[in-house]
Image (cartoon, rainbow, N blue to C red):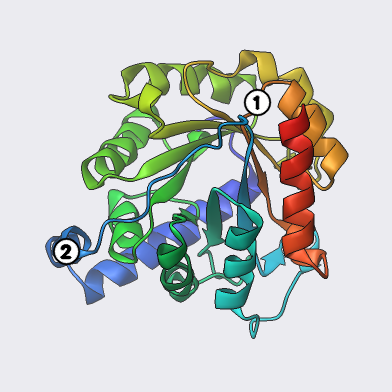
Amino acid sequence: MSGDSDFLREMAVGSAQRTREAKSACSEAALLERARAAPQAPALRRHPAGFDLIAELKLRSPAVGQLKSVAEDVHARVSAYANAGAAAVSVLTEPSRFDGTLAHLETAVRALTPLGIPAMRKDFLVDPYQVIEARAAGAGGVLVIVRMLPVSGLRELLDCARRLGLFVLLEAFDEEDIGTMHDLVGDFPGAAQGSLLAGLNCRNLATLQITPQRLIDLAHLLPRSVPRVAESGVASAADAQQLSRAGYEYALIGSALMKGNDPRALAAEILAAGRRR
């Protein structure tokens, strides 16, 4: 893990432990059979206006604290996101710091599939087994964090996702990550067809604080052959409009939507602003 942090190291250790436990309960071969038998997830579709929202289900944030209780109605929330026009819904499945579970992903899939919207598993993936878990749960995509693994490990995750028909959001935090991202995008078959997204997260992994200006300052470095995603620090219609003008095709928004009283209204407002450019 290049440029690692205590936070990512903690997440990687926990992720690997969860995977070992899952493998002891269900072999990779058995899980793969389940994944291949799962119904095809809805495709990730882009709006003609050129700006879209990936809305996030996140019950707790390590930086902010509890956003919603574990009793949150997952079905109702992700349905509100979809009805507001979200292109996809990101679902946290990490349990120790985010209160996430694979059950949340499965619930989201049940709500979103009839609406034609894919769910994306957001976690700290370290093993292709976890990509297979996502597909078995019905997800249409997964998040892959560039600095979580060596390039060889990242390519294994990407190849597994490609074989299972999942889109991938590659997440970078800095210039070094973006350099690695360029190599991965260049090697990924079908990247230009929308199966790969290039994301930039403006969170400082040492302090967990966000610096929204980094989304603007580093936008020009991101690959231009695939859609670009602004992550963290997007909380208002004005933010969305600024990022759209900077060249981002998507904004991934979690905390602002989770904290608000009317997530559907905020999501719709953000989308309208981003599409005005």
The disc labelled 2 sits on which kind of residue? Ala
Q: Is residue 239 visible?
A: yes
Percent position (x, y) of residue 230? 67, 35
Q: Nearer the viewer, residue 84 or 118?
A: 84
Q: Secondary structure at mark 2?
A: helix
Q: Where does residue 254 sit, x and y in percent of width and height?
A: 69, 55
Question: How far is the residue under mark 1 from the one under mark 2?
Answer: 38 Å
Q: Judge from the rendering whether residue 229 lies leftward or rightward of residue 254; answer left or right.
A: left
Location of residue 116 with respect to 95 vertically, above or below? above
Residue pictured at 56% horizontal, 37% vertical = 47
**Residue at the spot 84% in from the left edge and 46% down from the top edge:** 236
- Relative to 223, is 236 above or below? below
* Residue beneath disc 2: 37
Q: Residue furthest bottom?
A: 71
Residue 63 visible in the snapshot: no
**Residue 237 horizontal side relative to residue 81, left or right:** right
Pointer 2 local density, CA inside 10 Å: few below 14, some 14–19, many at least 20: few
> Few, some or many C-alpha atoms within 10 Å of disc 1 (few <14, some 14-19, many ≥20)?
some
Q: Nearer the viewer, residue 39 or 32?
A: 39
Residue 247 at x, y = what percent? 67, 21
Name which residue type carries label 1: Asp
Q: Is residue 256 above or below residue 227?
A: below
Q: Secondary structure at mark 1?
A: loop
The residue tagged 1 is 174
Which quadrant of the rendered structure holds the C terminus? top right
Q: Tell me where residue 116 sits by quadrant.
A: bottom left
From the viewer's perspective, tell me whether residue 106 is left or right of residue 256: left
